[in-house]
Image (tube, rainbow, N blue to C red):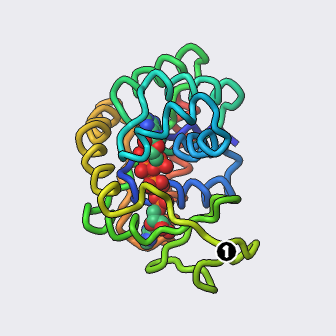
Amino acid sequence: MSEIRVVFLGAPGAGKGTQATLLRQQASVTHFSTGDVLRRHRIEKTPLGLQAEACMDRGELVPDALIIALVEAELATTSMFVLDGFPRTLSQAEALDTMLATRCMPLTGVLFFDAPRDLLLRRLTARWVNPRTGRIYNTITDPPRAAGIDDDDGLPLEQRVDDTLETATRRLDVYEQQTAPLIAYYTQRGLLTRINAAADIEDVAAQVRATIPALQRMETHR
Ligand code: AP5
């Protein structure tokens, strides 16, 4: 299979994590979520986790230097990946370009998950997660079979501390100020494909699947 190196770009709640989980089951790609990695560091109380937690709890971005070092270490071991939640600033996008250029491994595409703000806020405040596996549910759109219990392993589900109305609102503001400019950045490079992320999960998954041949063709033509 041709190599896929793709960024999932979109606001909090757009469905990046949900779709990256589905894609990794179909294509042999590494799903790298900076948010998930940071949350693991917090649980383990590593120096990075301790440095990141105040920013995360306020709904603000962790400093670029910390995140760039984290991603650089991760990408050293893989050539096919979905980056979920990175880059989120222009500095991070430029650092990613440099990292990949030194390894002659350009991005093969960027999928922009586009959905309106009021829908994003409703999704975030109804999200519940299995803390062990990371499986994502939604009490409105994708509930577990038994309320509050994971379908697969029966563990109690948890709500993320940054999914309160106040912090989710702040995260959406931060996205608009610091991350939305990346839509133009990747459009100018001819890499961006818009996904209608307001559709239901299956429909969005079908849109993502439909982009795979183009993501692979881009790789072979570079
Ligand atoms: P992170 O964990 O990356 O959070 P996020 O970007 O805010 O993204 P989310 O995980 O909230 O949303 P998602 O798009 O993955 O949606 P999901 O699929 O879960 O980051 C957390 C924090 O870490 C940041 O605030 C920051 O502090 C820090 N951080 C991380 N990366 C960083 C970086 N690069 N730089 C600096 N700081 C960084 O879906 C949401 C809900 O909707 C779920 O309940 C799901 O079931 C439901 N849903 C999904 N799709 C659909 C659909 N199509 N229809 C109906 N419901 C749906």
Residue placed farthest to the right in the image?
Answer: 153
Between residues 149 and 209, which one lies in front from this camera angle?
149
Image height check: is 24 above or below 65?
Answer: below
Residue 207 visible in the shown view: no
How many residues crowd around disc 1 within 10 Å: few (fewer than 14), some, or many (20 or more)?
A: many
User: Ligand 1 appears in which quadrant?
Assistant: bottom left
Task: Give residue 215's position: percent from left, percent from top.
Answer: 52, 43
Determine the secondary structure under disc 1. Answer: loop
Looking at the image, can residue 59 be seen?
yes
Expressed as whole percent of the image width and height from the top left, the position of residue 143 reads: 54, 80
Disc tally is 1
Q: Position of residue 102 (x, y in %)?
A: 56, 13
Please tell me which residue is depicted at 53% across the width and 55% down the height of the picture: 17
As drawn, 158 above or below 50:
below
Per the image, the residue denoted by label 1 is 150
Q: Residue at point 61% right, 60% down?
A: 22
Residue drawn at 64 percent across, 33 percent down: 46
The residue lying toward the viewer, choosing from 135 and 161, is 161
Report if the beta carbon of the residue with label 1 is closer than 8 angstroms to ligand 1. no
Q: Quadrant of the N terminus?
A: top right
Q: For this view, does 174 lie left or right of residue 17?
A: left
- Rendered position, 16 above or below 38: below
**Mark 1 residue type:** Asp
**Whether residue 94 is situated above or below residue 89 in the rendered picture:** above
Q: Nearer the viewer, residue 141 or 8?
A: 141
Q: Residue furthest top?
A: 102
Q: Position of residue 13 (x, y in %)?
A: 40, 59
Report which quarter residue 191 is drawn in.
top left
Tell me the residue at 57%/36% (across/down): 49
